[in-house]
């Protein structure tokens, strides 16, 4: 697999894309193809882009549209080399965990009264229908590169994903973490779904409203009130 455009084509040809590939943004020459080509151009210009091509659509692969029950929406992948793996906030690697994930686990412990998991891999959440999505699907690696691909073209793609979840799924909880995520709120039908918006869990903003927001218990309470199974966080 040579790049993001090739990885996108492979994803769309695979059973894992069922549901998602019906979105107009995934049509040939559509917004997803243009953004993937832009990410490939970044690499051709000498920038290191994360996550790797084979991982950048992991959120959609792990959580099919027909199974989405909760959406966690962040900003963009971790820019620290080796941290991003295609699932928002997830981390697979040696200690220490990314600081945003440490803060997520701190809030989880306060909210649910449970110790932090040993692993940073959030795949178990994704398998339960938690779509771990960022507003941009790629980023330049390196210090001070956060947000570097927010204008690369992924916005149209993630807008379409959120709109599809809102329009086709019943009773979804949307956890919008940070300003870029909250900017998507207008795409969500709040007559059917529940939105929990807060600051981003990064060290720069977690104390401005993420800590104390109790997103995990609030999400489960709403899901259960609406006849859905709780998430095992």
Image: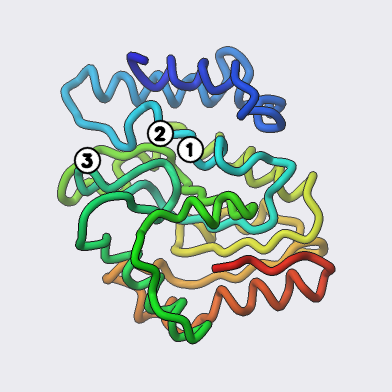
Residue 178: image tag: none
Residue 209 in sight here: no
Q: Secondary structure at mark 1?
A: helix
Residue at (72, 59) in percent of width and height = 172
- Do residues under tags 2 and 3 come within 8 Å of each other at their CB atoms? no
- Do residues under tags 1 and 2 come within 8 Å of each other at their CB atoms? yes
What distance separates the C-alpha of mark 2 from that of mark 3?
A: 15 Å
What distance separates the C-alpha of mark 1 from that of mark 2?
A: 5 Å
> In the image, 9: left or right of 145?
right
Q: Is residue 47 above or below residue 232?
A: above
What distance separates the C-alpha of mark 3 from that of mark 1?
A: 18 Å
Give the position of the N terminus as an image quadrant. top left
- Do residues under tags 3 and 1 come within 8 Å of each other at their CB atoms? no
Which residue is disc 1 drawn over?
58
Q: Is residue 50 above or below residue 9?
A: below
Q: Residue 37 lies in what quarter of the image?
A: top left
Q: Residue 102 lies in what quarter of the image?
A: bottom left
Residue at (33, 65) in percent of width and height = 100
Q: Is residue 36 above or below residue 6?
A: below
> In the image, 204: left or right of 74?
left
Horizontal and vertical percent position of residue 152: 39, 33
Which residue is disc 3 drawn over?
141
> In the image, 76: left or right of 155?
left
Horizontal and vertical percent position of residue 164: 71, 41
Q: Secondary structure at mark 3?
A: loop
Foreground of the two, 64 or 176: 64
Residue at (66, 56) in percent of width and height = 186
Q: Residue furthest front?
A: 118
Q: Secondary structure at mark 2?
A: helix
Which residue is disc 2 drawn over?
55
């Amino acid at each position: 697999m040579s790049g993001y455009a090739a990885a996108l084509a492979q994803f769309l040809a695979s059973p894992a894309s069922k549901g998602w590939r019906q979105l107009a943004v995934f049509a040939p020459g559509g917004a997803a193809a243009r953004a993937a080509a832009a990410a490939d151009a970044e690499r051709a210009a000498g920038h290191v882009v994360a996550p790797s091509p084979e991982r950048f659509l992991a959120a959609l692969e792990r959580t099919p549209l027909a199974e989405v029950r909760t959406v966690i929406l962040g900003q963009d992948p971790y820019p620290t080399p080796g941290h991003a793996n295609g699932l928002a906030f997830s981390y697979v690697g040696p200690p220490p965990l990314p600081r945003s994930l440490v803060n997520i686990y701190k809030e989880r412990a306060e909210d649910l009264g449970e110790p932090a998991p040993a692993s940073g891999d959030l795949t178990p959440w994704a398998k339960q229908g938690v779509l771990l999505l960022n507003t941009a699907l790629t980023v330049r690696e390196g210090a001070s590169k956060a947000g570097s691909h927010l204008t690369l073209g992924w916005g149209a793609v993630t807008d379409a994903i959120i709109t599809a979840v809102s329009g086709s799924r019943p009773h979804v909880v949307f956890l919008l973490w940070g300003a870029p995520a909250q900017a998507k709120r207008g795409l969500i039908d709040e007559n059917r779904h529940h939105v929990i918006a807060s600051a981003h869990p990064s060290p720069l903003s977690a104390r401005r409203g993420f800590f104390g927001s109790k997103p995990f218990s609030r999400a489960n309470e709403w899901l259960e009130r609406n006849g859905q199974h709780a998430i095992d966080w």
